[in-house]
Amino acid sequence: MLTHTTQEAVERIEQHLQQGQRHFTLTDAAAMTGLALDETREAMGTLLAKYLCRLQVSEHGDLIYHFGEVLRRRGEKTFAEWATATANWLWTIFTVIYKAWIAVTLVVYFLVFLVLLIVVIIIASARQSSDRRSSDDRRATMPPVDLSALLRLFAHIFQWRTQTASIDYREDQHGYRYPHYQPPPAALNTNKKSFMASVYDFVFGPPRVTRDPLANQQEVAAYLRQHKGLLVATELSALAGWTLPQAEAFFTDCLLRYRGDSKITDNAVLYGEFDEIVRSVGTVDPGAIVYYWDEYEADYELTGNSATHNLIIGLMNAFNLLMAWLVVRHGLVWLREFGRMDPALAALTAYAPALHIVLGWVPLVFSLLFFLIPLVRFIRLQTLRQRQHQENIRKRFFQLIFTTAGQPHTQRAIVETINADTQAETLAPAVVEEMMKTLCLDLAGDMQVTDAAEVQYAFPRITREYQEIQHLRAQRQVDGRLGDIIADSH
């Protein structure tokens, strides 16, 4: 007889969770709280929806709830995740501001300094002829400076487009083929990258192709529809590249998200049965199933520009930097001479202190950041590229392990199979050994020495779960049709 409400039962179990008891069976929970088994079972369903939890099965078929070393609510971010999100938000704000600064400063100051340089050259030429001509003659013969062409160039520079959504494929330096956004074409030559896009990428780098935040969930839904609504945790590892603890946690999430039932076979294999997700009108595309090893990680590019664009952009900013440094160092003493030569601009001499800041310190700081940001990115990219490289290597081993259902392989056979792909890099035996040792920890693998004195790796849990789920699917009959429509709100 039930004597407690679900909320009361949840609160009683929660007290033990908060005290550190986070690894127990259903009967353990009933024993430590005094609740009836039915009350405990209903309360555990609520707690699974509230907290992160892994479902485990003992060798005798007992279901174990593992809430982890730290009790965490679903959707709750850790301090590290909050710090990362905050840093990303601040970086995004800085990127937007600095890109706007780039659009104005790099181009405007380049044109302004170019005009000033022309003026200085004109003044120097005029001074050389001062002994032969009077000041009146010099003003009368001074050639006019036509800025109309520069103004037209200035207006054209702001006609740029953002990065396109089209994707092509490229190969990184190790031979791994990865998705890459196509850059926006130039206005005059569609076969070349837009110059303004090159300017932005020079500083911040081209955007990498990223997956949809719900891509894993979409793949699981499509996978369930194609595999009779049955799923085991190791299949989630194959889809997303997760370790088994990560796959177990996501398995629980899938049970809640798609209203699945957790069941245990006679051979102590935990699987999920999802009856609702397989039902469909039949006209909705469930999406493609992309296994973890089907697509390599996108490369971290420094600029993604041609050498010519990088050279031009670098020279433009170096010119701005040099001119700004000269203004900061020597001021605008030549402005008085410029004013005497053209009375219409003589009024600028009154604003020399302000121009010292606008034409000196502001472009100096901008130009230094323009070179400093790519330098810092270059240093950081070395670590990111190393991680990307290791992730791509890991994908190759996942493909071997899961396509053979975790069956035993000697190290020599693994080296031969992995290196059979002639497009990707050849992996040394030491690299293979190190990666297999890591995957044995991630995927509950075994490492043994055969009678022939060869190291052999096997993944018995993957083998057991794959064999069991295939047997269950072969016996399961699923009809996802909805039948005839008997009511319509129209």
Image (cartoon, rainbow, N blue to C red):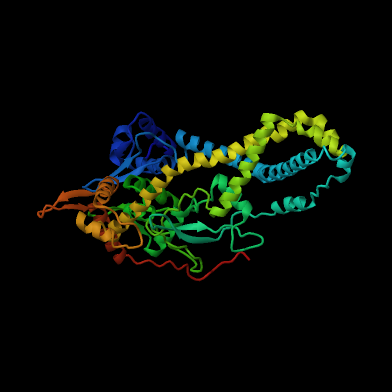
Question: Quick one: quadrant of the N terminus?
Answer: top left
Residue 179 x, y percent position in the rendering: 47, 58
Q: Determine the residue positioned at 11% across, 52% down.
A: 453
- Tell whether 377 sits left or right of 336: left
| Residue at the (84%, 40%) spot, across then down | 132
**Residue 363 position by quadrant:** top right
Q: Residue furthest bottom?
A: 484
The residue at the far front in this view is: 132
Pick the residue in front: 168 or 349: 349
Q: Nearer the viewer, residue 200 or 261?
A: 200
Q: Residue at x 57, y 37 (%)?
A: 90
Quadrant of res 18:
top left
Residue 71 at what x, y percent from top left? 39, 34
| Quarter of the rendering containing residue 402 | bottom left
Residue 277 visible somewhere in the drawing: no
Q: Is residue 168 above or below residue 461?
A: below
Left or right, 468 with reference to 197: left
Residue 92 visible here? yes
Q: Nearer the viewer, residue 466 or 476?
A: 466
- Total numbered badges shown on the rendered structure: 0
